[in-house]
Image (cartoon, grey):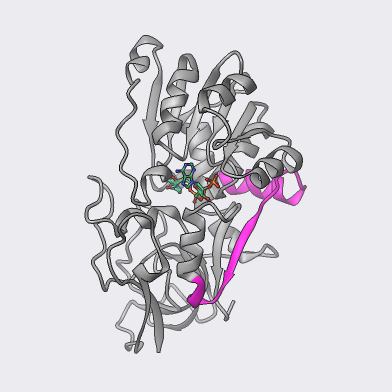
Amino acid sequence: MNRHLCLARRPVGKLSGADLTLVETPIPSLEPGEVLIRNTWLSIDPSIRIQLAESTPDGYLPPLQPGDALTGLALGIVVETRNPNFATGDLVSHTLGYREFAIVGPDARTIGGYGAPTRIDPRALPPQWFLGPLGSAGLTAYVGLFEILELTSADTLWVSSAAGAVGLLAAQLAKLRGATVIGSAGSPEKVTFLRDDLGISAFDYHDDPLSESLAGLAPGGIDAYFDNVGGDHLTAALDALCPQGRIALCGAVSEYDGVATAGPPNLFTMVSKGLRMRGFRAGSFTHLQEPMRQEVAGYLADGRLTYRESVFDGIEQASAALVAMLSGETTGKTLCRLRSA
Ligand SMILES: NC(=O)c1ccc[n+]([C@@H]2O[C@H](COP(=O)([O-])OP(=O)(O)OC[C@H]3O[C@@H](n4cnc5c(N)ncnc54)[C@H](OP(=O)(O)O)[C@@H]3O)[C@@H](O)[C@H]2O)c1
């Protein structure tokens, strides 16, 4: 038998555990080209919340319907195969997370181009790093900084949600490349972690108006903004950016969890200051996965990059993990480890 996390009812406002339910189904026999994977690690990402709404933005994945199983990046071990490209015992990354077992076929879906079934050789590294700093979070940080923002060592950069999976990596990679980095996060503990453990100037976005916090840490303004949050954070960045400043739109987590927001009222600053703003999805840049892994694995190995995980145990905890991550209760990469890991 298999257990999947499914949408029980469409959330109204913030996601609650009661909006999701675990459903048990038999595991069907494999068709030619399919593999049966016993999932070991599930990636808990904020973007799945977008698919729990009635509708999704143009160009994004379609909304889930009540009864549908959630999907997301995952790692698992092949336990049965009818695909000559995968052998029993292979460690595989794929997009059928939020369940104990996954049947992955030859036409397996991706998330915006990321997550095609891929055999992973973790060597001596913790396998779950391939869902974090050496996986989607690492690629997203790397692309946002170096392809979209074209970051230089002369830049002063603001990273929002800087204690989260992507932000933690973006803030540190930028610092390692010589930029001046300011991070924001939602609790005193996260700010202390950013300041004391990572050596990054940081503020709690609850404390003061964002414009004041930014002016305090970057009196000359910022040159680049790595946006994980959208909403009021994006508005503050538009005001704080210097002429010719750049924005990488990575995500808008403040708008996912049942909060309707209007666009920034100060978009004309794009014109008046000659700003550049570009959205991106890491899945369009998979050719950068290997250079990213080389650089990030090197920093992890020599201790120059600090990585944090918030781990929940068992498929029964997957919904709690998602609710906690969206509420800001987790730090670094949020993961669910299945008993079989
Ligand atoms: N473009 C891409 O290809 C791509 C790929 C992966 C992820 N993303 C995006 O990157 C962003 C970060 O993802 P992640 O996986 O690293 O998640 P994460 O930062 O580890 O977790 C989400 C965090 O968002 C913060 N948050 C929630 N509501 C907020 C609000 N109203 N205002 C400010 N902060 C809020 C919370 O931290 P606090 O305690 O700090 O509030 C929460 O822990 C998301 O927007 C995600 O969609 C984009």
Reply yes or no: does residue 111 show up in magenta: no
Answer whether residue 296 is visible to the viewer in this image.
yes
Percent of width and height locating residue 72: 41, 63
Region rendered in magenta: 292-317
Occupied quadrant, residue 239? top left
Image coords of residue 305 (percent x, y)? 70, 45
Find out whether residue 296 is within the magenta segment: yes
Q: Residue at x 45, y 62 (%)?
A: 73
Of 55 and 77, which appears nearest the observer? Answer: 55
Q: On the picture, is 214 further left or further right than 73?
A: right
> Where 217 sits versus 290, above or below?
above
Q: Quick one: 267 or 290, which is closer to the camera?
A: 267
The residue lying at 62 percent from left, 30 percent from top is 182
Question: At 33% across and 13% down in the image, what residue appears?
Answer: 271
Q: How many marks on residues?
A: 0
Q: Does residue 116 appear left or right of residue 205 in this picture?
A: left
> Looking at the figure, which quarter contains the C terminus?
bottom right
Of the pair 137 and 297, the residue shown nearer to us:
137
Give percent across and percent down for residue 245: 47, 18
Which quarter of the rendered picture does the N terminus lie within? bottom left
Tell me: residue 245, above or below residue 65: above
Position of residue 13 relative to residue 268, above or below, is below
Is 267 situated left or right of 229 in this image?
left
